[in-house]
């Protein structure tokens, strides 16, 4: 349920349960219009469909005014995110995406025997980041546990900037994720390409709780 947000800004609504979610009048109007409500329900029941349609709409927005060869929606072009990717690579990309969202159940479904082979250790081509980087960046505790214990991802894989998942957890103050990584053997003294350790990163971004936890670790 939604209630009117009490503040001095433009008209907004917030959820009554937590008070942390915000919706605009234009958002709520989608559920009042019969035609649009059907779309809302469809997306609510199928997250992947929403992601696919959003990707297409966003790609169209990005390429407005660009040469036609840059248009991913041109005739004969592959859908966004699928260009030059093999089925196995696409599956690995989906796995990293689920790690980013913290969706353990969805990630496990991608590993089912009926699905195409999925390399859980695969790195993102543009960044060198793996699923554990994604989970640590966003602070997903359960996903981090799953990747470390069940998928056996190594905790110290560095991306193209030399950052490990522990650097990510330190930067954003994810204390429990940092501890899970340390328990799995992550090295507190590993340095990125800037020469920074996870402790340096935690201190730089004023994440005091994580800094205190890292300060007591062997380098």
Image (cartoon, rainbow, N blue to C red):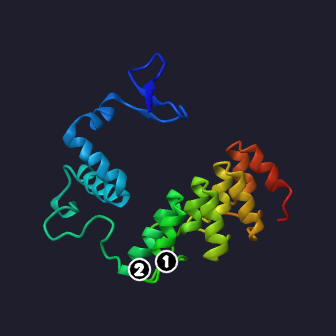
| Quadrant showing the C terminus | bottom right
Numbered circle sitting on residue 8: none
Q: Tell me the crowding category of disc 2: few under 14, some 14 to 19, or many 20 or more residues within 10 angstroms, Cα based.
A: few
Closer-to-camera residue (17/166)? 17
Closer-to-camera residue (61/108)? 108
State the SS at label 2. Answer: loop
Q: Are marks 1 and 2 in contact (CB under 8 Å)?
A: yes
Numbered circle sitting on residue 115: 2
Q: Residue furthest left?
A: 75
Closer-to-camera residue (34/119)? 34
Q: Tell me the crowding category of disc 1: few under 14, some 14 to 19, or many 20 or more residues within 10 angstroms, Cα based.
A: some
Up-down relation of residue 65 to residue 195 (above or below): above
Question: Is residue 88 visible from the viewing direction of this image?
Answer: yes
Q: What residue is rendered at 46% in x and 23% in y?
A: 5
Q: Is residue 199 left or right of residue 120?
A: right
Q: What residue is rendered at 47% in x and 79% in y?
A: 112
Q: What residue is rendered at 51% in x and 71% in y?
A: 108
Where residue 103 appears, as percent x and y from the top left, is 51, 61
Q: What residue is rendered at 46% in x and 30% in y?
A: 14
Label 1 vs label 2: CA separation? 7 Å
Q: Is residue 154 left or right of residue 93?
A: right
Where residue 17 appears, as percent x and y from the top left, is 53, 34
| Quadrant showing the N terminus | top left
Up-down relation of residue 124 to residue 53 (above or below): below
Closer-to-camera residue (153/190)? 153
Q: Is residue 138 left or right of residue 27?
A: right
Question: Is residue 154 visible from the viewing direction of this image?
Answer: no
Q: Which residue is mark 1?
A: 111
Where residue 117 appears, as percent x and y from the top left, is 44, 83
Where residue 149 appears, as percent x and y from the top left, is 67, 73
């Amino acid at each position: 349920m939604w209630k009117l947000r009490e503040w001095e800004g433009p008209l907004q609504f917030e959820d009554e349960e937590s008070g942390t979610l915000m919706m605009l009048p234009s958002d709520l109007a989608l559920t009042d219009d019969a035609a649009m409500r059907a779309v809302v329900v469809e997306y609510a029941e199928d997250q992947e469909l929403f992601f696919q349609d959003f990707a297409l709409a966003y790609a169209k927005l990005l390429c407005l005014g660009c040469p036609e060869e840059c248009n991913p929606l041109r005739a004969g072009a592959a859908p966004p995110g699928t260009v030059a990717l093999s089925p196995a690579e696409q599956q690995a990309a989906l796995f990293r995406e689920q790690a980013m969202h913290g969706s353990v159940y969805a990630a496990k479904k991608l590993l089912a025997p009926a699905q195409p082979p999925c390399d859980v250790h695969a790195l993102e081509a543009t960044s060198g980041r793996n699923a554990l980087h994604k989970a640590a960046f966003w602070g997903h505790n359960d996903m981090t546990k799953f990747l470390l214990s069940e998928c056996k991802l190594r905790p110290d894989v560095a991306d193209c900037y030399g950052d490990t998942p522990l650097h990510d957890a330190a930067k954003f103050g994810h204390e429990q994720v940092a501890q899970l990584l340390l328990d799995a053997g992550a090295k507190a003294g590993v340095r990125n390409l800037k020469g920074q350790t996870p402790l340096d990163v935690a201190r730089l971004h004023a994440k005091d709780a994580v800094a205190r936890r890292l300060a007591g670790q062997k380098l």
